[in-house]
Image (cartoon, coloured by chain):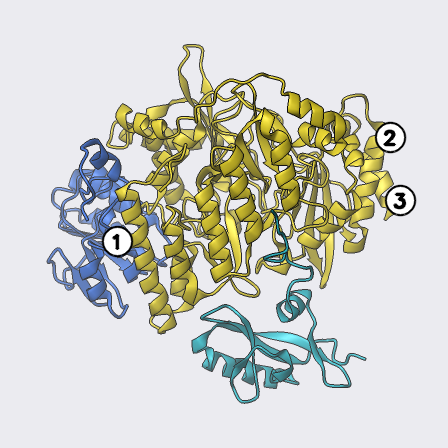
Amino acid sequence: MPDTHFYRYDDYDRTLVAERVDQFRDQVRRRIAGELTEEQFKPLRLTNGLYLQLHAYMLRIAIPYGTLASHQLRKLAEISRKYDRGYGHFTTRQNLQLNWIKLEDAPDALAALAEVDMHAMQTSGNCIRNVTADHFAGAAIDEIEDPRIWCEIVRQWSTLHPEFSFLPRKFKIAITGSPNDRAAVRVHDIGLRLWRNEQGEVGFEVIVGGGLGRTPMIGKTLREFLPRDELLAYLEATLRVYNRYGRRDNLYKARIKILVHEIGAEKMREEVEAEYASIRDSALRLPAETIEAIAEQFAPPVLAERPAISGQVEAERLSNPEFALWLKSNVAPHRVQGHAIVTASLKPAGSPPGDASAAQMDGVADIADAYSQGEIRVSHEQNLIFPHVALDDLPKVYKSLAALGFAEANVGKITDIIACPGLDYCALANARSIPVAQRISTHFAGLAQQHDIGDLKIKISGCINACGHHHVGHIGILGVDKNGVELYQLSLGGDVDFGKTAIGTILGPAVTADKVVEAVDALVATYLDTRSAGERFVDTYRRVGAKPFKERVYAAV
Amino acid sequence: MPLFSEAGLPASFVALSFADWQSRPEWPAVSLSNTDPVEDLAPHVGRLRLIVLNFPKFSDGRAYSQARLLRGRLGYRGELRATGGVLQDQIPFMLRCGFDSFESEQKGFEEALAKARTLFSVVYQPAEDGRVPASRLRLDHTGPAA
Amino acid sequence: MAKNLSGDLQVASANRLVDGMVVWLDDAGQWTDRLEHAAIARDPRGAEILLERARAESFTVVDPFLVAVSEDDAGVIEPLSLREKIRASGLTFDAIAAEAVRYA
């Protein structure tokens, strides 16, 4: 296995994953032989990432903390060719979904994944799901500590947890190590934010009970500062309280956010702290050696400092306006001088957001090998990231990405749309998402126009489960079904930035599918006419309120 | 329902409901619903020989927490029986939480129980079965049990 | 012109167990991936019987259910709901082609 700058499986990890594949192979055999009913089998396949969607089974592969090595991405490409239709969909939870898997092939696909130390465990089902992190982790300029160290510790603790595999509902944990939250920690079942207190110690703010879905809620801080080595005890205490007292009578009220809401944050804190007091000094306390051993594996690559300005970049910037725009939107500062973090946009104009073909995955892996220490990240905004690129290499990275169709200079812009798979694939959806995203993307494709409009996050979900995070879009679009007709409800003012996290407000009556583009156009026009200097769309909305936006939209549709 | 037991008490051994047992706390066997407060058994665990925990559906996991509290927190050492929605694919989890007897109607349960302890040779968490998690074994620099 | 838009006509559908593929029950009681071969129930009693037959044949499929369809004068049947239209005819956009992107 090639060396990586993140956690490397040892024999324990490999043994467990291999035994899990064997167990699932036997479960699939028993299902096909008729020894298991669908009702009995469903939770077993779900906790191995296998859904039954509209047209086929879908396999959701975990990409823990969104971090991939190039050889892993190539294996994903190979699996998509061999067992699927040669493409995959990167999701808002940093996973990869293959849409056309056969049940009879699923154990082999999982065995192939295991060859590169990957799995699909707990990417579905009422258990602790794949833990997500800041996609700039380990490279971000504002980072206090790499959150992936803690994601890995949580990944191991939560994997096949005997007590928490039949929770009232799914359970999502996100961790950020930066003050600029790129992991949306306030809208997770548990969000953890690493910060440094006045004594200079690093610990976790523990935020519980956030989430989107039917009842969007911003999480409450249960603990301002938790010592790092007590993390697992605190998580176990929180999960135990939830497992015992979370509602099981109503699917829509079963998430931990409803428990926190119903008993109140104060009572929740009392319950968790009481449980925590009983177990904080148990075997769950992490020995320093364990933390250090995992932290060492996340030691960043050694990058020599380079000049802060690159001659190649400056020359290319002057001669190529699209490259200049790309530098502004798709390239972020790196903590080591002379380097940058590059986002490959999986949102070329008019394409399904987050989709990549096997050839594109191979191409991204090659670029990572050549220019980014062999490492790739998946963002919850459904893009791929090269975390460690030397400035001098940016023109070459741009050119290679352009050949793949992933060099669109639109990161953070109006066409960098988040969308769930929607009714084209998903058994839960009420309306389509991807075609709506494609129409908006095509309409606003001009890069100069996009950069003039500036930062604007559009997020689209095809049903109230909100996989497309519509609640926290600057413009949120929710597909609903009304008497067999797809309608789209618009909301404004959502945000996931830390300290500004907000749930969007519904603008007015839903519009028909053919009017969505006109409605978004009217929203943008209102912003352009109303903005003050330096204001983003969402800032203007906050300043002037919904009224002018609403009037223009409903005059237009 | 057929009983599969590693513990040894016969199926005929009567466990009282928690409400009935409260009026006869000298009785050595009690059956708890998921909402009965396991903590209240603390003064009695030394005398109890059988505690039955209920899975209303196989997907309702509250009894896993009850089991861990009885074993880990209260130090209960008698028989801990799972009843209700008990399926063979849950056995590894149940064993780890401290169950040692099972009532199940599922075909093939006995064979599955015999294999359940060896299905996974690695565990990641401390639980109630005394197995040492991988994180501890790594500190001892030993290889995996397999 | 479509008849029976009220949804009197029903076919039985499911996903095939081994590969998840969309199938419908035909007149011979076999599961087929061709909607045009689906057995059509034309009244509520017929629909009940069709669903019972589908359930009796459900060893190789997952959770059979009824789908309301329309039938035109040429006998072509089409599901009424968008969801079932998509199940019958596939994605409503072009999925990214596996080898669409070639790079040097």
Q: Is residue A407 above or below residue A427?
A: above
**What hue does chain A carry in this figure?**
yellow
Q: Nearer the viewer, mark 3 or mark 2?
A: 2
Q: Which residue is mark 1?
A: B92
Image coordinates of residue A154 in percent, x first then y, are 37, 36
Q: Which residue is mark 2?
A: A529
Residue sitting at 60 percent across and 39 percent down? A381
Residue type for callout 1:
Pro
Label 3–label 2 contact, CB within 8 A: no
The answer, for residue B23, to whether it is visible in the render is: yes
Taking the image as shown, residue C74 lies to the left or right of residue A179, namely right
Seen from this angle, which residue lies furthest top? A199
Seen from this angle, which residue lies furthest front? C104
Q: Nearer the viewer, residue A117 or B88?
A: A117
**What hue does chain C carry in this figure?**
cyan
Seen from this angle, which residue lies furthest right? A555
The answer, for residue B37, to whether it is visible in the render is: no
**What hue does chain B carry in this figure?**
blue
